[in-house]
Amino acid sequence: MCEDYRAAAGIDLEHDRASRAAGDRIRCPLLVLWGASAKIEAWYDALAIWRGYCSGQISGGAVASGHYLAEEAPQEVLERLAGFFG
């Protein structure tokens, strides 16, 4: 887990910047989920942000949880995934 955070501030960030500069976009459908009691909704319009990175269909929304969606609201996350992949 720590390595994931470390990569996000280093090599992943470099790759993301290069992809954006090249105009690369996600081309498949994308499901975006976030915790309703976390800060994402207060700070960002998450779906609008992802629309800037994706040319495919985007869906999603808040899950009744905090930061750890799968651990805090596993049934709701499974339902959202089943609906997306259905």
Image: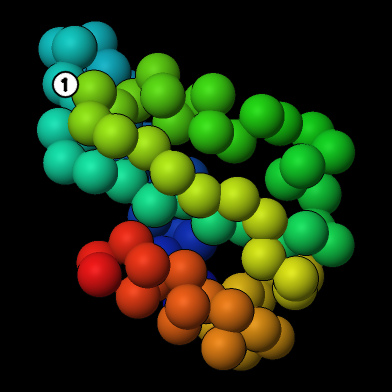
Which residue is at 73% across, 45% downward?
40
- In percent of width and height, residue 17 lies at 31, 23
Q: Is residue 7 left or right of residue 76?
A: left
Q: Position of residue 28 (x, y in %)?
A: 16, 41
Q: Is residue 19 visible?
A: no
Secondary structure of the residue carrying numbered label 1: loop
Residue 46 rendering spot, x and y as whole percentages: 59, 36
**Viewed as shown, does residue 73 lie left or right of 27?**
right
Mark 1 sits on what residue? 24
> Residue visible at 46% across and 59% down?
6
**What's the residue type where badge 1 is placed?**
Asp
Residue 66 appears in which quarter of the rendering? bottom right
The reply to whether residue 62 is in sight is: yes
* Quadrant location, the C terminus: bottom left
Here the colouring is rainbow
Which residue is more in the foreground, 12 or 37?
A: 37
Question: Is the residue 29 above or below the residue 33 in the image?
Answer: above
Q: In this picture, is 32 found above or below 86?
A: above
* Left or right, 57 with reference to 59: left
Residue in view at x 67 percent, y 56 percent: 62
Mark 1 surroundings: few (<14), some (14-19) or many (≥20) residues within 10 A = few
Vertical placement of residue 77 versus 40, above or below: below
Q: In the rendered image of this protein, does residue 16 appear above or below residue 85?
A: above
The tally of labels here is 1
Q: Nearer the viewer, residue 47 or 14?
A: 47
Residue in the picture at 77% in, 42% down = 41
Q: Nearer the viewer, residue 14 or 83?
A: 83
Left or right: 83 with respect to 44? left
